[in-house]
Image (tube, coloured by chain):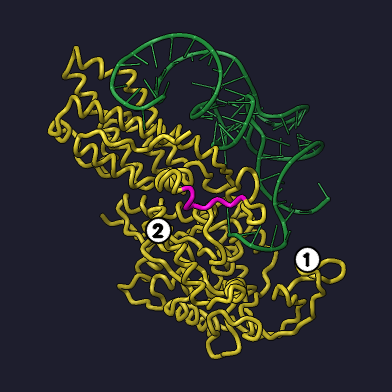
Amino acid sequence: MDKKAKYITTTLPYVNAEPHIGTVLEIAQADCLARYYRLMGHEVFFSTGTDEHGQKIAQKADELGQDRHEYVDEYAATFEKLREALNLSNDAFIRTTSEDHKKAAQEIWKRCEAAGDIYKKSYTGLYCVGCEVYYKQDELDENNCCLIHLKPVEEVEEENYFFRLSKYQDQLVAYLEDESRTPTAWARTWTLEFAKGGLEDVSISRHVSRMDWGVPVPGDDEHVMYVWFDALTNYISTLGWPDESPDGNFQKFWVDGDTLQLAGKDQMRFQSLIWQAMLLSAELPQTDVIQYHGFINIDGQKISKSIGNVISPYEVVEKYGTDATRYFLLRHMHPTEDSDITWAKMDEWYTANLVNGIGNLTARIMKMAQTHLTVEEIQSHIESKQVDDLFELQNDNPQSVPDLAHYTASFSTYNLQGASNNVWQLIGDLDQMIQDTEPFKLIKTDEAKAKEIIVTLVGKLQDVATRLIPLMPETAEIIYQAVRENKKPENLFGRLES
RNA sequence: CGCGGGAUGGAGGAGUGGUACCUCGGGAGGCUCAUAACCUCCAGACUCCGGUUCGAAUCCGGAUUCCGCAACCA
């Protein structure tokens, strides 16, 4: 099989808060795509991690009286635990405070500098001491006070490094005009309009007297990089860059492979503009595809600590299990638009589609198989199928595997909801097929015919399992095992206590 | 006219030019392999007004209305 390598990343969550259900949407999507590409025979590198520098984190650690390194270690651990909770298959977990990452951030800085794209400029701004942030005039109230501390801002002059974003405007516009680069229409329109509207150079450093929790600027101990300049580099530092050796991961995945970055709608300026300009400046290939997603609302409201409506992924996993949580995120969240979630909805999705849907279907088919067929009879008809076999099956008889093309087409447009809908359509078809053919009744009058039907059903159940691999890997494996052993498994999904 | 996104049966959601689909809920029936499950049928919807078109939930214009755009927060 000669298929292109696939590289997938998420944006890195900032470690100033526990992960919530919105944080993990993107990670679950990325994992699903990674598993899909592996299923299709691609070599895959899937990376996620944590963004750990910057003022907010330094401030938070300082407030807690905690060593900053200890603080980020603790938080990074709560994000790394997601790997187990959500059964993630990431090949790397990149932390921006790691030495290798810092070296990469300094290297890309040097390359941009060598290209003449980094310069020092004194910057006069309205600074709020309380927030430790510069504000623009229109972000202040009528008394020139910041809206949080309600104290007057100070006019402060600081010398910072700037990145020549403006220089890359035309190239960025060309990049964004290519629809394949930004498949989500609203994101493409927004970034394109923004770029056409004129790009200003951006400040990319902070003086250590104000903020020192960051990667030191090469050759200038007085400054550290502003957090996103360092953080964006993670997409290649995780691949071992600046190592560009021919057999290294950077060459294999970033240069020769297909690169896919997932990001939330708040990230458009950073991912599509600044990061792409940094790559241009450093003379590295740009990201092939950036796929943007919407946000999750909880009962119609945005996720907010002050409202107190935050749902933790760990709570969801505890109540419904890993695969069910993946299922909610992948099928019931819109792949690109905002979506809404509540505990009541999760209960409904769980019972209707997992307990009564895939769980019950597996039980009824495998009970019939276990009762009426031997392991040998199953094995003689069911080979361990891979996706290529499914394609062959479809070519022989398009009706036999309904809409497999729809399944793969959905994945090719990153529409995980569409792909899962396809699986549940197949599940529905099988329930109906059992009702229509009544093998449980036929077995008494025409055993051979009934057995044939049951074997067919088992085969189709295995097709369901195959298509479930990217979405719900544990469930897929349980079904595979049940078919292999010709044994009805324990209930896949237990009923919720009412 | 600040910017942007919405308005689809009782509820929540799919659906970017051709029989409106799914889940829950309501009504009637069926089946007994299955986890009080599953199947069939019924009632019930594209916010409004105009336009383009042979044909519009879908494209265009207008109206009404809801949501996001300070902070915590993806």
Asked if residue A280 can be seen in this view, the reply is no
Q: For this rendering, which residue is in front, A111 or A28?
A: A28
Q: Nearer the viewer, residue A329 or A217?
A: A329
Crowd class of label 1 (few under 14; some 14 to 19; many from 20; radius 10 Å) = few
Tell me: A88 left or right of A397. Answer: right
Q: Which residues are magenta?
A: A309-316
Residue A58, above or below A93: below
The spot of residue A37 in percent (x, y) is 36, 53
- The answer to whether residue B12 is above or below residue B1 is above
Q: Position of residue A100 (x, y in %)?
A: 42, 78
Q: Which quarter of the picture shows residue A383?
A: top left
Q: Is residue A167 magenta?
A: no
Disc 2 crowd rating (10 Å Cα; few below 14, some 14-19, many 20+) is some
Seen at 67% across and 61% down, the residue is A194
Residue flagged by tag 1: what amino acid is it? Leu
Q: Which chain appears yellow?
A: A
The numbered mark at residue A147 is 1
Residue A28 in sight from this viewpoint: yes
**Residue at point 64%, 50% (across, down):** A302
**Does dot 2 land on a helix, a strand or a loop?**
helix
Reading the image, the residue beneath label 2 is A83
